[in-house]
Amino acid sequence: GLMEYFIFITNQCNLNCEYCSVVFGKDDRPNKPIYSPEELHHFINVEENKSNQGDVSLYFFGGEPTLYYDQIINFISYFAERKTNLNYNFILHTNGLLLNNIPEYIINNINLIMLSFNYDKIPKYNLHNSYFSQIIDGVNYVKSIRNVPTLARLTITEKTSLFTETMQILGFFDYVYWQIENRFEFNNYELFSMSYMYELKLLFDYWA
């Protein structure tokens, strides 16, 4: 199977999403990797040689990893320049707000861009120059240089609509993925559950 390694480039972020799971206990974690690309490369090769796997995915994660593009380049360049029996896939997990500044080196070496959307921050009108338009413009910039696959990642809460969210972003990305907010309890679980199942059927009917 495919092994995945998550590299926390930083715990800093340029958003403050209330449902974010990373914020819990982040003060107890280092703000940037405490290991070098060389140390990570050695660790992965030792681990993978135990199971003889051929494919490895490296996720650049956070916080918001695009705050430190130079660190991402350091890891990609080190791994790309060292040929082994492993096939490395580089995946950028980002909120997309800084994609307009992404270096071409990363665009030319990345295998997938996962974009986490905060639907609460998408305005209901006047989309120009908004949170939403910044992400779309960033993705278009990347695609203008190289057709990197993009996956929109949604968190569904009681305050959002699965159907509305998905339909609004469907035309801009190659794939859509969603998850339900992880929480101890819902304000009205029965209403949320009924709405979620109804909207799920709307989506399946639309795709069918």
Image (tube, rainbow, N blue to C red):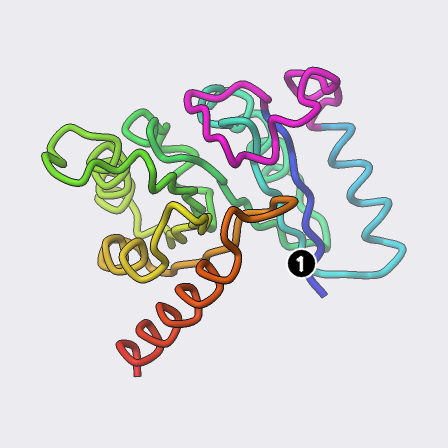
Image coordinates for residue 77, horizontal then vertical, percent: 56, 32
Indicate the quadrant containing the C terminus: top left, top right, bottom left or bottom right.
bottom left
Q: For this view, does 156 lie left or right of residue 29?
A: left
- Tell me what residue is drawn at x 50 percent, y 62 percent: 190
Q: For this view, does 147 lie left or right of residue 94?
A: left
- Per the rendered image, the range of residues in magenta is 10-37
Image coordinates for residue 191, horizontal then vertical, percent: 44, 60
Number of numbered discs on residues: 1
Could you classify mark 1 by the number of other residues whose Cα lies within 10 Å: few (under 14), some (14-19), or many (20 or more)?
A: some
Element class at badge 1? strand
- Vertical side of 146 occupied by 63: above or below: above
The front one of 34 and 176 is 176
Whether residue 20 is in magenta: the answer is: yes
Q: For this view, does 178 lie left or right of residue 129?
A: right
- Tell me what residue is drawn at x 49 percent, y 40 percent: 92
The front one of 18 and 135 is 18
Snapshot quadrant of residue 33:
top right
- Residue occupying the far right of the picture: 50
The front one of 55 and 96 is 96
Image coordinates for residue 198, horizontal then vertical, percent: 37, 72
Indicate the quadrant containing the N terminus: top left, top right, bottom left or bottom right.
bottom right
Q: Main secondary structure of the magenta part?
A: loop
Which residue is the site of mark 1? 55
Amino acid of disc 1: Asp
The front one of 151 and 204 is 204
Whether residue 64 is in magenta: the answer is: no
- Tell me what residue is drawn at x 60 percent, y 26 percent: 23
- Vertical side of 161 occupied by 113: above or below: above
Q: For this view, does 75 lie left or right of residue 69?
A: right
- Tell me what residue is drawn at x 58 percent, y 22 percent: 10
Image coordinates for residue 158, horizontal then vertical, percent: 43, 49
